[in-house]
Image (cartoon, rainbow, N blue to C red):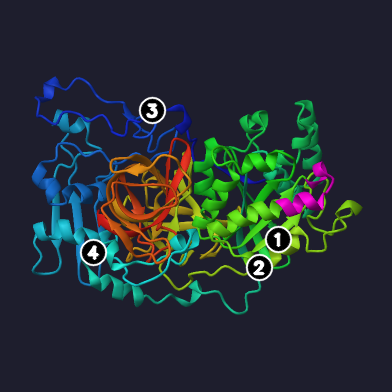
Amino acid sequence: MPRKVNYGVDYDDDYDEYDYGYEVEDNEETPPEQETIKRSVWRCAVCTYDNDETMSSCDICGVLRGPLLKNLTYDEKRAGFNSLAANIFYLKSSRVHSIVVGEDEAVKVSSKRLDSSDVSTAKDKHNRLDEITFNMQSSGKSLLSLMPKERNVMVANSSSSRNGGKAHDLASNLKNISFSAESGHSNDTNPGRANSYAQYKPEKWMLPGKTEHSLAQLNLAIVGHVDSGKSTLSGRLLHLLGRISQKDMQKYEKESKLQGKGSFAYAWALDESAEERERGITMTVAVAYFDSKIYHVVVLDSPGHKDFVPNMITGATQADAAILVIDASIGSFEAGMDGTKGQTREHAQLIRSFGVDQLIVAVNKMDVVDYSKDRFDLIILQLGTFLRSCGFKDSSVSWIPLSAAKNQNLVSAPSDFRLSWYHGPNLLDTIDSFQPPPRDFSKPLLMPICDVIKSSSQGQVSACGKLEAGALRSGSKVLVMPSAIIATVRSLERDSQPCTIGRAGDNVAVSLHGVDANHVLAGGVLCHPDFPVAFAKHLELKVLVLDVATPILIGSQLEFHIHHAKESARVARISSLLDSKTGKVAKKAPRCIVAKQSAVVEVTLHEAVCVEEFSKCKALGRVFLRTLGRTVAVGIVTRIVEV
């Protein structure tokens, strides 16, 4: 059965304005006996929902709860105490952690058990520290010099790549992006880390052997406008390839007919929740698998409704290739292409910004228009022009007329004579024609966490996600960010089956040992202990504004999406506008950014996220900015301004 991955619901359309701040308690010292009120809830920064104190992320929209550090003096924050403590002591830990940050340096943080006689300390011992000691193993380093500068050693150092380039369209801004000197100054405080990263040498077991004949993995996102037939297409394909048994299919047909939704039988194979079946729409990302002649395909069936675009972003960001499903019926295709309500345009732009350049356009429901070649050609003409403006090359886009409901042109040549004018390959053969995606086997481990599975009875926790770089096996040491805790891999699962090794490109569930379940969060990252990712909240971005009517101003409040993390953000500065043809600075310090303009901006997040510059890691450097239920801009991280 497919595994459902839930990332939360976007309720932007229901709000006219946002409250982006937590309720801040008064920091004035009061006698212990006056502390009679204890907070049992915390407020989400995006949807303002009051969550239970035990929740690590918002129960409504999925935004991570940031560490709440109280009673810190201004001098301590200036010294970097806040950011270090936020990473090391996120929750109730009173253990001793030692984090290696280089060959010659380390930061050792120790905390003593809290004194139970102190009433005020005992009440909030899970987010206050009784005593913290910083020891530097290298000579000549003082505490004050460590905190603001060397903090970047633990999380990632930032530098702005400086080379010329041209930006003609969305592809030029997102794929062949240029990092000009005008975009910002380098903030790399530890040049030695770049050298050590380049000198990283993987072990032999991390690289795939020449004798291994397993199928290459292909993560395939199924996207498109709501009701275009994405789930029906996925379910029918899985059934034809033997991934859904005939017994299960008969059960789905019977259950769907009882609810008056007989045409949704194949969709029910992936839409498993009662709410999805009742509403007849996909709300979360469903994960399923099938094997073709060349690939082991991981199907990411994404929701098409505009309320669940954030789910689509967090799920489909793992994609290597995509199928854009189009409803060929009269009026439905036009609705999907509508600039304000249609999701065909937005999904195509998002897929391209994910780095996907291989696309199949599946023109579905051709039986409704009697397999009309004229209708098919009209869709190619109108949609093809838009896809080229997004940066897709004609040679990388395949157009296939089909009917998922009638099983026409899916795994074999069409049998209906009305489709005899089509002489191209079927859908399955076109999937096999994709070029194998490149994999970073020789780089240090990097796995963004898309979902966390907790077993309260066994006390185990598993992190699920796609390995973007490196490899894992049982016994491997990993650094869990942003908690900054080193854990041990207990076991691995790939496609719900135990495996010994997971390599770059694999979707795995990693069972961890030696870490509390509350320290493993969706939106976090598993990385190599010697190469931790950055954890920052002030970033410089190079963005492309999409077709939106409202301009982006300094102070604009936005939703910030990066890999599987979502956070509220504010535009702190608009540095410059970029020329769409040359990529060079066209105007410095503009007042606003309007549709189809490229710009360099700085954003400040409400809470820090795991991030890297795009030049160092593409998966952790792509960002999406949304507001009022729409994606307003896409871009990349060019510089980490402040951690």
- Please name the predominant secondary structure of the magenta segment in the image: helix
Q: Using the numbered discs, state the Cα–Cα distance from disc 1 to disc 3 in whole angstroms.
A: 43 Å
> In the rendered image, which quarter is residue 480 located in?
bottom left
Q: Which mark lies nearer to you, 1 or 4?
A: 4
Q: Earlier in the sequence, mark 1 or mark 4?
A: 4
Question: Magenta includes 368?
Answer: yes
Amino acid type, mark 3: Tyr
Can residue 206 be seen here? The reply is yes
Residue tagged 1: 291
Q: Are marks 1 and 2 in contact (CB under 8 Å)?
A: yes
Residue tagged 4: 185
Residue tagged 2: 215
Find residue 13 and report its horizontal and vertical position in percent. 47, 31
> How many residues crowd around disc 2 within 10 Å: few (fewer than 14), some, or many (20 or more)?
few
Q: Which mark is residue 49?
A: 3
Find residue 145 and report its horizontal and vertical position in percent. 11, 60
Write down the region rendered in magenta: 366-378
